[in-house]
Image: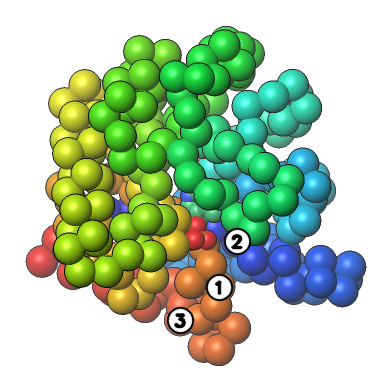
Amino acid sequence: MVKLGVNVDHVANIRQARKSVEPDPVYAAMLAELAGADGITVHLRHDRRHIQDDDLRLLRKQVRTKLNLEMAADDEMCAIAASVAPDMITLVPERPEEITTEGGLDVIGQQKIIRKTIDKLAPLGIKIGIFIDPDKNQAQAAQDIGVKHIEIHTGIYAKSKGEHQQAELHKIIKVAELADSHGLEVNAGHDLTYYNVLPIAEIPQISELNIGHNIIARAVLVGMEQAVLQMLKVIQRAGS
Ligand code: PXP
């Protein structure tokens, strides 16, 4: 059964809009876990636009399932990750002007810094993976560099329609098959919604989906637990 990691960054976005103390992403994470989420994901960005260092430390103490830290591969984030020791890290590209992560990390072009990050953090027992586009060469490069998991970028799939969407789905399936055949754990995420998630959840090689914005958007209206339960209900249709 495909697992659900809930990204709570957007709860922090609402708080940071007023530089207030509410809503608290740690509370949101607890409610997500109570509703059945298999993991909690946060992205600590250089500009700290949503998640703050203290959130990360509190989450480390409170999360009972699995804490996945999305981060850029650089010295600042490496030092924070080493002190917090999340269960797992997903390396992502980061551009200061972007609204959200725009695509996968260029594993081939960024080999040196990725390797340095893995060498520092893997000995601490942290499982390290890379967010990649659905591209076989990137998946191969991720395997060569020695990570344990990849997360396939579903953003283009989610934003396209018709034949273009089917072609993108096909690419995701092929990369999932390749990575799985090489022993990598395969996750997927970005721009997934209650309406577009099922074909991705149905890919047998995919073990976990990371979903943030759409769950938090629904939680604003129906509450965090209901929003998580409703997403679990959709993705669990994949197994039936
Ligand atoms: N996976 C990665 C690597 C991401 O950077 C994000 C956004 O932080 C997500 C998944 C979740 O994307 P969304 O908020 O669109 O569900």
Residue denoted by label 1: 216
Q: Quadrant of residue 112?
A: top right
Q: Quadrant of residue 191?
A: bottom left
Camera-side mark, 2 or 3: 2
**Cβ–Cβ under 8 Å for marks 3 and 1:** no
Residue at (46% x, 24% y) in the render: 107
Residue 25, given in percent of the width and then of the height, sits at 68, 63
Residue at (64% x, 58% y) in the render: 99
- Residue 191 is tagged as none
Element type at mark 3 = helix
Q: How many marks?
A: 3
Amino acid type, residue under disc 3 in the picture = Gln
Q: Residues within 10 Å of mark 3 (few under 14, many from 20)?
A: some
Task: Find the distance from the CA under tag 2 to the CA under tag 1.
Answer: 7 Å
Answer yes or no: is residue 41 visible.
no
Residue denoted by label 3: 226
Task: Find the distance from the CA under tag 3 to the CA under tag 1.
Answer: 11 Å
**Cβ–Cβ under 8 Å for marks 2 and 1:** yes
Q: Relative to 24, does residue 180 appear above or below in the rendering?
A: above
Residue denoted by label 2: 8
Element type at mark 2 = loop
Question: Where the C terminus falls, by quadrant?
Answer: bottom left
**Label 1 beta carbon less than 8 Å to ligand 1:** yes
Give the mark nearer the N terminus: 2 vs 3. 2
Seen in the image, is 147 located left or right of residue 213? left
Q: Residues within 10 Å of mark 2 (few under 14, many from 20)?
A: many
- Name the colour scheme: rainbow
Question: Where the N terminus falls, by quadrant?
Answer: bottom left
In front of the other: 196 or 208: 196
Amino acid type, residue under disc 2 in the picture = Val
Amino acid type, residue under disc 1 in the picture = Ile
